Amino acid sequence: MMLAVGRNVTDPLNTVLGYIAWLVTAAAVFGLLIVGTRMAISLRSGQGDEHLVQFATVMGACIIGATAGPLVKFLLR
């Protein structure tokens, strides 16, 4: 089912989606830096397996954040 929405409604939404996409990208990079730093510290102390779940969680959030914008644009086309 496609929504019939005019262009004047979707233009502000596209602007907001653009800002949110940049924020998600910044949060993803920051999250990966934090998890990577914690992994490096843990590897030096001999406990490297703990942070693999956190890394997978951050990567899953990156995938969800990356696909949200195009999905909304497709639905409101």
Image: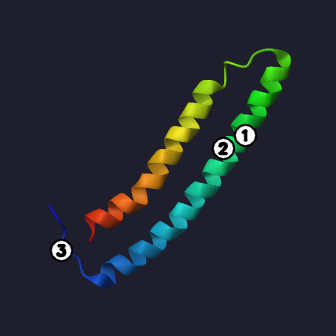
Q: Measured along the vertical axis of the image, is residue 22 above or below residue 8?
A: above
Q: CA distance from mark 2 to mark 3?
A: 38 Å
User: Residue 68 placed where, x, y %?
Assistant: 41, 55
Residue at position x 73%, y 36% in the image: 36
> How many neighbours does mark 2 have within 10 angstroms: few (below 14), some (14-19), or many (20 or more)?
some
The amino acid type found where label 2 is placed reads Gly
Please state if 25 lies on the left or on the right of 46 as rendered: left
Quarter holding residue 77 = bottom left
Q: Measured along the vertical axis of the image, is residue 47 above or below residue 72?
A: above
Q: Residue furthest bottom?
A: 8
Mark 2 in CB contact with mark 1 (< 8 angstroms): yes
Secondary structure state at the residue bearing disc 2: helix
Secondary structure state at the residue bearing disc 3: loop
Q: Residue furthest left?
A: 1
Quarter holding residue 55 = top right
The amino acid type found where label 1 is placed reads Ile
Quarter holding residue 8 = bottom left
Please state if 68 lies on the left or on the right of 40 as rendered: left
User: Residue 65 placed where, x, y %?
Assistant: 48, 52
Residue matched to label 1: 34
The tag earlier along the polypeptide, 1 or 3, is: 3
Residue matched to label 2: 31
Residue matched to label 3: 4
2 and 12: which one is in front? 2
